[in-house]
């Protein structure tokens, strides 16, 4: 019996009705999510101090947040 957000499948037999949880109502008719995670090629990691500052030790995952700089305000 699987448990999702504190609600077990046995409690949610009627798939047409939402089930109330602490996070709000959810439909129990299917899976909540499906992830695709591609294989990552090994590369030399950052030094610990650089990795800590960047939030990752892997250079290929180092994607700086640009935020407002990427928005054209005309």
Image (spheres, rainbow, N blue to C red):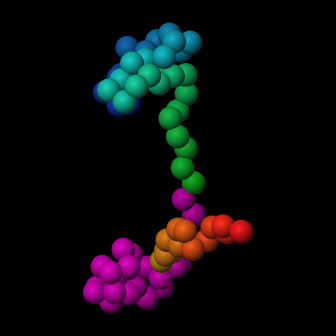
Q: Picture quarter containing residue 3?
A: top left
Q: Which of 17 and 15 is in front in this view?
A: 17
Visible residue check, residue 1: no
> Is residue 57 part of the magenta span, yes or no?
yes
Q: In this view, does 50 lie above or below 28?
A: below
Q: Please provide percent x and percent y for residue 54.
A: 38, 79
Q: Where does the N terminus fall, quadrant-wise?
A: top left
The picture places residue 43, in percent across and down from the top left corner, at 48, 85
Residue 24 percent coordinates (x, y): 40, 25
Give the magenta part as a residue range. 37-60
- The residue nearer to you, when weighing 63 against 3, is 63
Please count the marks in the image. Answer: 0
Q: Which residue is drawn at 40% across and 85% down?
A: 45
Position of 24 with respect to 36 (left or right) is left
Residue 59, magenta (yes or no): yes
Residue located 49% across and 75% down the image? 64
> Compared with residue 49, is residue 65 higher up or lower down, i.e. above or below?
above
Q: Main secondary structure of the magenta part?
A: loop
Q: Is residue 40 left or right of residue 8?
A: right
Name the residue: 50% across, 35% down: 32
For this orientation, the residue located farthest to the right is 74
The quarter of the picture where the C terminus appears is bottom right
Seen in the picture, residue 45 relative to 17 is either above or below; the reply is below
Q: Residue at x 52, y 40 (%)?
A: 33
Residue 34 position in % (x across, y down): 55, 44
Residue 54 appears left or right of 66: left
**Relative to 62, does residue 24 appear above or below in the rendering?**
above
Regarding residue 6, the answer to whether it shows in the image is yes
């Amino acid at each position: 019996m699987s448990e999702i957000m504190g609600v077990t499948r046995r409690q949610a037999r009627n798939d047409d009705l939402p089930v109330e949880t602490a996070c709000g109502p959810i439909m129990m008719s299917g899976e909540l999510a499906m992830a695709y995670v591609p294989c990552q090629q090994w590369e030399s990691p950052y030094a610990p101090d650089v990795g800590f500052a960047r939030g990752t030790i892997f250079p290929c995952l180092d994607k700086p947040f640009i935020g407002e700089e990427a928005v054209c305000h005309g």
